[in-house]
Amino acid sequence: MHYQDIYERSISDPEGFWRQEAARLDWFKAPETILSRDDQGFDRWFAGGQLNMAHLALDHHIDHGRGEQTAVIHDSPVTGRQRHITYRELRDEVARFAGGLRALGVECGDRVVIYMPMVPETLVAMLACARLGAIHSVVFGGFQPHELAVRIDDARPRALITASCGIEVSRILPYKPLVDEALQACDCPPAATVVLQRPECEAAMQVNNATTRDFDWHRVMADASPVDPVAVDATHPLYILYTSGTTGKPKGVVRDTGGYAVALNFSMDAVYNLDPGDVFWTASDVGWVVGHSYIVYAPLIHGCTTVVYEGKPVRTPDAGAFWRVIAEHRVKTFFTAPTAFRAVRKEDPDAAMMAGYDLSCLKAVYLAGERLDPPTYGWIKAITGLPVIDHWWQTETGWAIAANPMGIEPHREKSGSAALPVPGYQIAILDSDGSPQPAGTQGNIALRLPLPPGCLPTLWEDDDRFRYSYLNAFPGYYDTSDGGYIDEDGYLFVMGRMDDVINVAGHRLSTGEMEELIGHHPAVAECAVIGIADELKGEVPMGFVVLKEGQTIDPAVLENAVMDVIRTQIGAIANLQAVAVVDKLPKTRSGKILRKSIRQLSQERDVAVPATIEDPSSLEEIREALETVRVSRYAR
């Protein structure tokens, strides 16, 4: 069947379509009801079916003769160690650690917070929770104590799992002091903390604390008896994932078990074109949704080998790190964020470090997490000669909303576009009143209900917030809060968050479009555009750029060049107020540019440092650049 036939069937007969996909999994009790409504009026998939995610990811493959296949490759350039783990070895570790958690009082429905680095034990912890039917909540390792504490209090876990440290390039980050501080600040600390001691940093253990007690990971494993997978309902929560950048009460995205398993398995074929036994590398962190879906669950459910990488794209040891891992482990499909390739391009603009690596194994490169700007797309395409697939999704959906359907019927690529709706998703472009917009017209990107399996059914213990955050703006639709348009060929162009639209003298302008134009300049590695206050026009755009390695262009020459491009391509109304060259842009640890923080700095000098920021000093550069512009404008 062709893409259009499959897509139309997923929309016209969603129950029949997803019943067929569900039948590809190994259920304990196959679902009879495919789509239904719960007591809150929310759509639920496969209610009444029973399964276990750890069984699907491990036991099923062993039962079908894949026990000796490598399940996980741990590649850690920061420690100089590698480890290959078979499906059987991973199943045995997971079953035993699940028994250890049960001995600590963790049962089906309990929550477990996981605060870990990129090591195989993190996957073991997640899968052990799934094996018990416990609900895990992974918090990105390195979050500060306050951010960890508010998530603990919201989830109210029975146990917390951590490591003695994480490693950032050559810097040791002790985790245990951060955990101890967070637990002291909690109203509902867990009774048990399990600590994986790493040789790079031994953590002090507390055994007689009045409220919580530390347990050594290896002792827990040694004393435990393995347990079998617990059958849970398809609608049983697998995990809670708190969205980054939240303030006040955190927003906990709930992921159910059955719908997620079906959707992920479908996506491995339809989107990523992978077969059991293929090697899939997602260069992200398990603390983010990409890591949950495509480092841990999807590759293992589908019988692939997943690479767990503890390192950076350019500093472990250099900008050839990606090519080394791909060649060495024979990666077929590679998935990362555009910012990672921008970092590589900045350090190695001619891709000289690709030389000497046999990359014949690599068949496609996938990008997501932020908009793939055309200059970065063009650079990756030029150096690899491979399909470069920009696809778009959110923490809330858990898997791709729009993509090039490589496993169904590959379509031609369009620079700047996330391509076509993935089967199951009905994408609409709406104006502020909720009216559909014609092809080529920008508006709010919304998804017609019901959402397909795998998407969030609600927020953790906050149904009302789920309604007003996602459902109330456009009745009958899920509001993505992203803006963009669909062209005449049905290709989706995501231009950025709707709050990245600025109003210049009554004209609504996309900062994403301006960033795309600036990014084409041969000296620019990456950029960000925001609106700054203006007495006459309300807002005017200002750009911040990072230069490629070795570029020495005069800032005034660069400013004049990009201003001319914006005026020529968009119009005089979009004339940039200024262009500031900075060494680095403020980013989250997952690589997203913190545009909201940049905007806040344009309005007030002191802003809260986001919990997700990778390098707080980057804010000072932005602050100084903004101050220079303020002085210059005042002098006029």
Image (spheres, grey):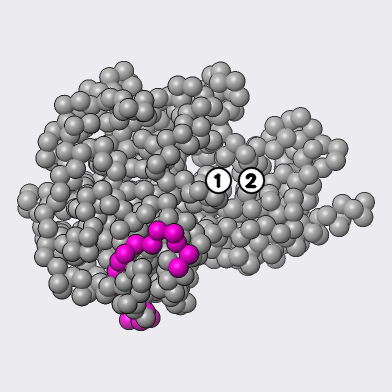
Determine if the magenta segment contains residue 483: no
Which secondary structure, mark 1?
Answer: loop
Let me know if residue 195 is in the magenta part: yes
Q: Residue at x 22, y 22 (%)?
A: 16
Measured as percent of width and height from the top left, residue 128 is found at 22, 57
The magenta segment: 184-203
Rendered position, 451 above or below 95: above
The mark nearer the N terminus, 2 or 1, is: 1
**Residue plotted at (54% across, 19% down):** 436
Q: Amino acid at mark 2?
A: Glu
What residue appears at the point 69 percent right and 46 percent down from the top-left corner? 530
Q: What residue did someone put label 2 on? A: 515
**Residues at discs 2 and 1 in contact (Cβ within 8 Å):** yes
Residue 188 seen in this snapshot? yes
- Please, what is the three-letter code of the amino acid marked with disc 1? Asp
The Cα–Cα distance between marks 2 and 1, rounded to whole angstroms, is 8 Å
The residue carrying pointer 2 sits among few (fewer than 14), some (14 to 19) or many (20 or more) residues within 10 Å by Cα, namely many
In the image, residue 429 lies at what x, y percent? 53, 25
The label shown at residue 373 is: 1
Q: Residue furthest right?
A: 636
